[in-house]
Image: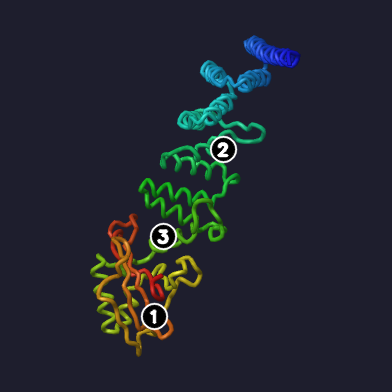
């Protein structure tokens, strides 16, 4: 047992000695490199190699503070160094690794605004900065700028189609609805708009199509209030006035489907006349709107339309279109649900 402990103590001592020697060697290395760095005859490529070696040595020792101080001090004292964007990229990336996202954002943004782009191992530093900024920036205005930079400067490295959708969402957060419509229109003009799958944004094509089509429509079917819409539809049903019902229906994105379907289904959008369902039928409606109605949506239960599917719920909704204040907040008859509610 004594022999075992003696061996253990010896092994521990050797490990400590190795670590100490390694640190001493690294420190000696850095000191020598610092001396070399101060040599005025050092060429540009050699200077780059020395700075890179010092920074990476400090990083490998986990002396992150030392690395950050060394690089930021170098940039401050040598504003004409053509590699300053790369040194600051190392600084920003290290802060990002440490979870200091606001500081990392500051440096990524500083590189974009103050330093020319560089290709390191064939990859653009500015492109890498933009990628990181889009991930960590919280301000829509900043993200709009970054997305636009990607589209204008690096169109071959990103999906332009996806960029237009993401731009539209950021513009919406800023309340710039004309830009929202412009971005969605440009998205719809892309050849892969209807097939692209965008992470975190389901039904991008359908949503863009609805908004743009609605913007380009007359919108003359909308009503100033739910009460006015409800009374008009009920009167038309009582009088079997199919022409008025056809007039009241939304002319854009109107759907007719079962409760299990989705508005995005291929067979959900309908373009038919109410005449074929009213002639010879006995149509009735509930006196009150369905109890599940709310300030933004309402359902009116009706019966007698067809022997095969007699129950229809007429679906009314408040118009959400801030781009046009005169239309935003009005009401429209947007669709029909077939059958009893699930």
For marks 2 and 3 on the same chain, the one whose residue lies earlier in the sequence: 2
Q: Quadrant of the N terminus?
A: top right
Cα distance in 3D space between marks 3 and 1: 24 Å
Residue 211 lies, with reference to residue 114, above or below; the image says below
Outermost right residue:
3
- Graded by Cα atoms within 10 Å as few (under 14), some (14 to 19) or many (20 or more), the crowding at tag 2 reads many
Task: Report the side of 112 relative to 156 (left or right).
Answer: left
The reply to whether callout 2 and callout 3 are in contact (CB within 8 Å) is: no
Question: Can you identify the residue that label 2 sits on?
Answer: 127
x and y, in percent, of residue 118 in the image: 60, 31
x and y, in percent, of residue 271 in the image: 43, 75
Q: Nearer the viewer, residue 326 or 63?
A: 63
Q: Nearer the viewer, residue 167 or 65?
A: 65
Q: Residue at x 60, y 46 (%)?
A: 156
Q: Nearer the viewer, residue 224 or 42?
A: 224
Q: Nearer the viewer, residue 156 or 105?
A: 105
x and y, in percent, of residue 130 in the image: 52, 38
Cα distance in 3D space between marks 2 and 1: 54 Å
Helix, strand or loop for disc 1: loop
Looking at the rendered image, the disc whose residue lies closer to the viewer, 2 or 1, is 1
Q: Residue at x 55, y 41 (%)?
A: 153
Answer yes or no: is residue 41 visible: no
Question: Can you identify the residue that label 1 sits on?
Answer: 273
Answer yes or no: is residue 46 visible: yes
Task: Report the side of 257 relative to 3 (left or right).
Answer: left
x and y, in percent, of residue 90 in the image: 57, 27
Number of the label disc, if any, that sits on residue 211: 3
Residue 70 lies, with reference to residue 226, above or below; the image says above
Residue 59 lies, with reference to residue 285, above or below; the image says above
């Amino acid at each position: 047992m004594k022999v075992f402990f003696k061996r253990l103590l010896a092994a521990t001592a050797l490990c400590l000695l190795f670590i100490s020697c390694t640190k001493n060697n690294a420190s000696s290395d850095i000191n020598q490199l610092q001396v070399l760095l101060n040599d005025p005859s050092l060429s540009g490529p050699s200077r780059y190699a020395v700075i890179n070696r010092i920074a990476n040595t400090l990083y490998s020792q986990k002396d992150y503070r030392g690395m950050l101080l060394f690089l930021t001090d170098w940039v401050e004292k040598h504003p004409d160094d053509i590699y300053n964007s790369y040194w600051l990229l190392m600084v920003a990336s290290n802060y990002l690794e440490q979870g200091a996202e606001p500081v990392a954002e500051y440096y990524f943004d500083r590189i974009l605004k103050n330093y020319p782009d560089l290709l390191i191992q064939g990859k653009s530093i500015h492109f890498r900065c933009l990628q990181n900024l889009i991930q960590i920036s919280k301000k829509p205005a900043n993200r709009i700028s970054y997305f636009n930079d990607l589209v204008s400067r690096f169109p071959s490295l990103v999906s332009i189609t996806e960029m237009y959708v993401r731009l539209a969402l950021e513009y919406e957060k800023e309340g710039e609805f004309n830009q929202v419509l412009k971005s969605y229109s440009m998205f719809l003009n892309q050849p892969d708009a209807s097939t692209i799958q965008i992470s975190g944004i389901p039904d991008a094509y359908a949503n863009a199509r609805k908004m743009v089509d609605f913007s380009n429509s007359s919108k003359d079917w909308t009503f100033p209030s739910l009460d006015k819409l409800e009374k008009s539809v009920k009167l038309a049903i009582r009088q079997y006035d199919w022409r008025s019902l056809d007039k009241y229906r939304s002319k854009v994105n109107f759907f007719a489907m079962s409760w299990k379907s989705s508005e995005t289904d291929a067979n959900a959008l309908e373009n038919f006349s109410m005449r074929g369902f009213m002639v010879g039928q006995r149509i009735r409606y509930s006196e009150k709107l369905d109890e599940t109605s709310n300030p933004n949506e309402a359902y009116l239960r009706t019966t007698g339309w067809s022997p095969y599917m007699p129950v229809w719920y007429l679906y009314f909704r408040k118009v959400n279109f801030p781009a046009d204040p005169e239309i935003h907040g009005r009401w429209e008859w947007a669709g029909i649900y077939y059958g009893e509610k699930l």
